[in-house]
Image (cartoon, grey):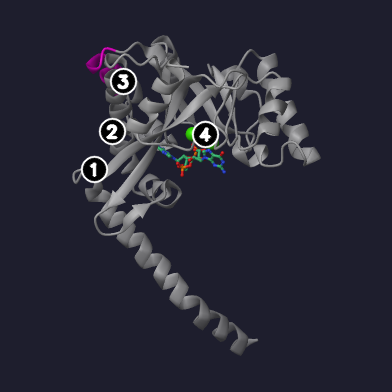
């Protein structure tokens, strides 16, 4: 057993060491990325499922590191949350999304709303309503132009002024949506406690729709729960026409996913909006 233990340890070491150096490397580079202007945003259309009309977009963070190359957000955002770097990075995301929306509107594009992802860490250590308000003011946008996507982790961490911050944001007209709805562990009573305007059904459930019976049943139940308490529903990860049909049948209005478009550059997004205007 001892030898097996040592062997296991020996084979495990290089991978563990690599993980540690990866972590250090990512965290060191992350610290400089904002100053080096290595971040940019891509936009994934959010469409009316029935008509295909683009209603808005979700802003998704991209990082092109000089040292590490292109990194997927799933790879670096957890590190940025650990170090706290996500706080200034997240503030930049809000600022940049507002700047972009202003530019699009000035160019005559009718885009109702941009959704941004906000980490639980931003609720813990940032005056989020102030960050949001100053970005809205700077770009002369109403609060209704912005939607904030948060995961249930925000509610689990339970910062003392979470509810007050939510109410302030709601007072500005900003929409609050629970991202990855159904993936968390908290009880459903937070739907009543916090002033949410909608839920976003996770793509992990959408994958099994409509052929996996339990995924489909869960999706259907989540849509029903949300609607019964007056919340809007948006579905993510819509990849197939049958999924779109399923969602429409069960009363979901908005969706996003590869069926419509992946996340694209600002230029490409503007082109998508222009194309639909001319049809
Ligand atoms: P998310 O908020 O759940 O974003 C949806 C992810 O699913 C995006 O990956 C998107 O490109 C991908 N996706 C879109 N359509 C489809 C589809 O039809 N099928 C499948 N399988 N996937 C689809 P991405 O851009 O790699 O982002 C990954 C995660 O990183 C996001 O998940 C979000 O949690 C986080 N993230 C991205 N940008 C930000 C940000 O600015 N701030 C924070 N805090 N987190 C962010
Ligand atoms: Ca999201
Ligand atoms: Ca999601």
Q: Nearer the viewer, mark 4 or mark 3?
A: 3
Q: Which residue is mark 4?
A: 151
Magenta span contains residue 136: yes
Q: Are marks 3 and 1 in contact (CB under 8 Å)?
A: no
Classify 10 Å Cα crowding around label 2: few (below 14), some (14-19), many (20 and above): some
Q: Please, what is the dominant secondary structure of the magenta stretch?
A: helix
Element assignment for label 3? helix
Label 1: few (<14), some or many (≥20) within 10 Å? some
Q: Residues within 10 Å of mark 3 (few under 14, many from 20)?
A: some
In this figure, which residue is indicated by the disc labeled 2?
A: 92
In three-dimensional space, the C-alpha distance between marks 1 and 2, rounded to whole angstroms, equals 8 Å
Is the residue at mark 2 in contact range of ligand 1, meaning its CB lies under 8 Å from it? Answer: no
Residue matched to label 3: 104
Query: Under 8 Å from ligand 1: the CB of mark 4?
Result: yes
Label 3 near label 4: C-beta < 8 Å? no
Count residues near mark 4 (Cα–Cα under 10 Å), then give few for <14, some for 14-19, many for 20+. many
- Is mark 4 in CB contact (under 8 Å) with mark 1? no
Whole-angstrom CA distance, mark 4 to mark 1, is 24 Å
């Amino acid at each position: 057993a001892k030898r097996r233990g040592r062997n296991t340890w020996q084979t495990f070491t290089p991978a563990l060491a690599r993980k540690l150096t990866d972590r250090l490397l990512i965290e060191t580079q992350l610290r400089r990325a904002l100053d080096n202007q290595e971040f940019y945003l891509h936009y994934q259309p959010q469409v009316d499922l029935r008509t295909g009309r683009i209603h808005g977009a979700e802003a998704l963070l991209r990082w092109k590191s000089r040292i590490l190359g292109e990194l997927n957000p799933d790879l670096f955002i957890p590190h940025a949350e650990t170090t706290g770097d996500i706080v200034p990075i997240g503030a930049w995301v809000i600022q940049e999304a507002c700047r972009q929306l202003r530019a699009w509107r000035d160019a005559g594009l009718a885009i109702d709303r941009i959704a941004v992802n906000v980490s639980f860490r931003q609720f813990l250590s940032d005056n989020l309503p102030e960050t949001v308000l100053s970005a809205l003011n700077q770009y002369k946008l109403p609060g209704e132009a912005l939607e904030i996507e948060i995961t249930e982790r925000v509610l689990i961490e339970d910062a003392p002024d979470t509810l007050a911050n939510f109410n302030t944001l709601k007072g500005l007209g900003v929409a609050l949506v629970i991202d990855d709805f159904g993936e968390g562990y908290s009880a459903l009573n937070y739907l009543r406690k916090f002033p949410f305007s909608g839920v976003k059904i996770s793509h992990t459930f959408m994958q099994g729709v409509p052929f996996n019976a339990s995924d489909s049943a869960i999706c259907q139940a989540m849509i029903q729960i949300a609607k019964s308490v007056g919340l809007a529903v948006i579905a993510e990860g819509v990849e197939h026409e049958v999924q779109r049909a399923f969602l429409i049948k069960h009363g979901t209005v908005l969706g996003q996913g590869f069926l419509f478009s992946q996340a694209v550059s600002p230029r490409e997004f503007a082109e998508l909006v222009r194309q639909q205007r001319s049809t």
